Amino acid sequence: MVTLRDVPGLPDADIAPPVIAESGDPFAALRIVHLLARIPRGRPVRVRDIVDALNARWLDWSFDRKVVLDAIVQLQANWMGDYRTVGGIVLDRDAYGETVMIEDSPRVDPWMILQVQALADASAERLRDFTREQGDIS
């Protein structure tokens, strides 16, 4: 193993490159659904505002409307699969663009936590796969 020495004044190299969020990527979906779990319930929220909030929160990421909409549609499909209803997550459109409304009921938060946990698990698995593919780099 290489022993590293301190170099006074050496700038920090821990700067992450920008990431462009992609549909189907568990890391992007994790961030999107985590934010959706915290939006107000029972009233429409503009997708454009969600995109802006994601980009403000994750400065090293770039989220666009299509990727956010894809994550919402997937979440909506998961809801319909679990509850056999279409009213839990409603994607709509108003004069300003797309909106999403999540029902205001006690079943939403526990369900959203499970959705976020599943995405966190999928992201962790993707990291494990990456590490295995890289092999022993020591």
Image: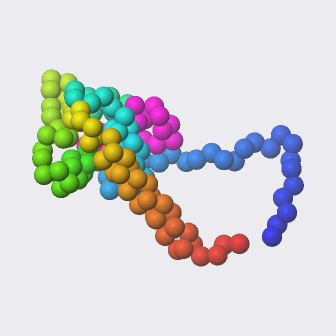
Q: Is residue 33 left or right of residue 17?
A: left
Q: Is residue 60 inside the magenta stretch?
A: yes
134, 99: nearer the viewer: 99
In the displayed structure, would residue 88 be above or below residue 134? above
- Horizontally, is 77 left or right of 29 in the view? left
Residue 100 lies in quadrant: top left
Which residue: 85% across, 63% down? Answer: 3
* Residue visible at 33% across and 41% down in the picture: 109
Question: Quarter holding the N terminus?
Answer: bottom right
Residue visible at 56% across and 69% down in the picture? 131
Colouring style: rainbow
Magenta span includes 62: yes
Q: Identify which residue, 2 or 86, lies in the foreground.
A: 86
Query: Which stretch appears magenta?
Result: 53-69
Give residue 97's quadrant in the image: top left
Q: In this view, does 138 lie to the left or right of 42?
A: right
Question: Taking 36 as reference, is 117 above or below it?
Answer: below
- The answer to whether residue 92 is seen in the rendering is yes
Q: Nearer the viewer, residue 99 or 55?
A: 99
Residue 126 is situated, as x and y percent measured from the top left of the image, at 46, 64
